[in-house]
Image (spheres, helix red, strand yellow):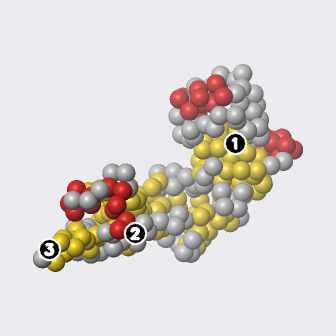
């Protein structure tokens, strides 16, 4: 069976067709970004709240090294502020009189796969993953695209420990906020449940849409799962 895995917009897939993938395989890379603050009001000698009158670039604008960011007319011409970096205007702070520039660096960071199987195809936005067998279910909501090895717990009175839950996805009907916090402390990567939380957990969360699906999921207890936020789908697979 084929499962479609979304590729984040800011990333490039580094997997190849027919490649075997597991949880230790890097699957995407993205350029790293840092922020740089430019004190426009200080350099131009203006009041911070007057910054917009002197700007040549605004939030969202792409900047090349050497571009003029702001300028002020002076007695013998113009006082100009030029960018020392290439990047994007992330923020204009008129309280501090600053521009925040998001700089794209040459170094790249890689992310490990949250799925396993064989790559059938890689397109611009998706990875077509071939797995042995899979079952698809609808979600009410998902906090992110995530997945991993599933651990099945029928009720929250079950003793949870780091040995059997760390780096795994917890599948459970319902969980108290206290137990959710305990699960986070044990290193659980995410939770799949039916009942929502009043206080949202810090880890990934997927809510099943249909109550009856939970019994089917526990009956099969397939070893792995993938959650796709954009399609509100969850796949349990082997």
Q: Quadrant of the N terminus?
A: bottom right
At a point 63% along the width and 30% down the height, the residue shown is 180
Where residue 132 sits: x, y (%)?
68, 59
Tag 3, which secondary structure?
loop
User: In the shown orientation, is residue 215 left or right of residue 16?
Assistant: right
Between the residue at mark 2 and the residue at mark 3, the CA separation in whole angstroms equals: 26 Å
Q: Residue furthest left?
A: 76
Q: Nearer the viewer, residue 35 or 152?
A: 35
In the rendered structure, are the residues bearing label 2 and label 1 in contact, judged by CB atoms less than 8 Å apart? no
| Disc 1: CA contacts within 10 A as few (<14), some (14-19) or many (>=20) | many
Task: Say which of marks 2 and 3 sits in front.
Answer: 3
Where residue 82 sits: x, y (%)?
23, 70
Q: Nearer the viewer, residue 36 or 92?
A: 92
At a point 70% along the width and 23% down the height, the residue shown is 158
| Disc 2: CA contacts within 10 A as few (<14), some (14-19) or many (>=20) | some
Which residue corresponds to mark 2? 58
Question: Can you say whether 234 is above or below 101 in the image?
Answer: above
Which residue corresponds to mark 1? 192
Question: Can you say whether 7 is above or below 98 in the image?
Answer: below
Where residue 156 sits, quadrant-wise, is top right
Which sits earlier in the primary sequence, circle 1 or circle 3?
3
Which sits earlier in the primary sequence, circle 2 or circle 1?
2
Task: Say which of marks 1 and 3 sits in front.
Answer: 3
Where residue 118 sits: x, y (%)?
58, 64
- What label does residue 75 carry, if any? 3
| Disc 3: CA contacts within 10 A as few (<14), some (14-19) or many (>=20) | few
Where residue 119 sits: x, y (%)?
57, 67
């Amino acid at each position: 069976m084929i499962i479609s895995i979304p590729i984040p917009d800011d990333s490039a897939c580094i997997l190849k067709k027919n490649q075997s993938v597991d949880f230790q395989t890097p699957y995407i890379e993205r350029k790293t970004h840092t922020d740089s603050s430019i004190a426009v009001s200080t350099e131009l000698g203006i009041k911070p709240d007057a910054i917009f009158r002197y700007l040549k670039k605004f939030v969202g604008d792409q900047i090349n090294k050497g571009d003029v960011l702001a300028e002020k007319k002076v007695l013998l011409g113009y006082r100009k502020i030029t960018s020392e970096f290439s990047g994007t205007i992330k923020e204009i702070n008129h309280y501090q009189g600053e521009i925040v520039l998001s700089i794209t660096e040459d170094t790249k960071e890689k992310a490990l796969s949250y799925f396993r199987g064989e790559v059938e195809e890689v397109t611009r936005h998706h990875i077509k993953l071939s797995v042995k067998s899979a079952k698809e279910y609808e979600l009410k909501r998902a906090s992110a695209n995530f997945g991993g090895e599933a651990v099945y717990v029928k009720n929250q009175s079950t003793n949870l420990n780091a040995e059997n839950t760390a780096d795994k996805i917890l599948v459970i009907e319902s969980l108290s906020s206290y137990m959710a916090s305990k699960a986070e402390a044990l290193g659980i990567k995410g939770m799949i449940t039916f009942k929502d939380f009043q206080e949202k957990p810090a880890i990934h969360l997927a809510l099943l849409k249909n109550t009856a699906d939970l019994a089917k999921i526990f009956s099969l207890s397939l070893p792995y799962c993938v959650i796709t936020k954009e399609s509100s789908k969850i796949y349990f697979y082997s």
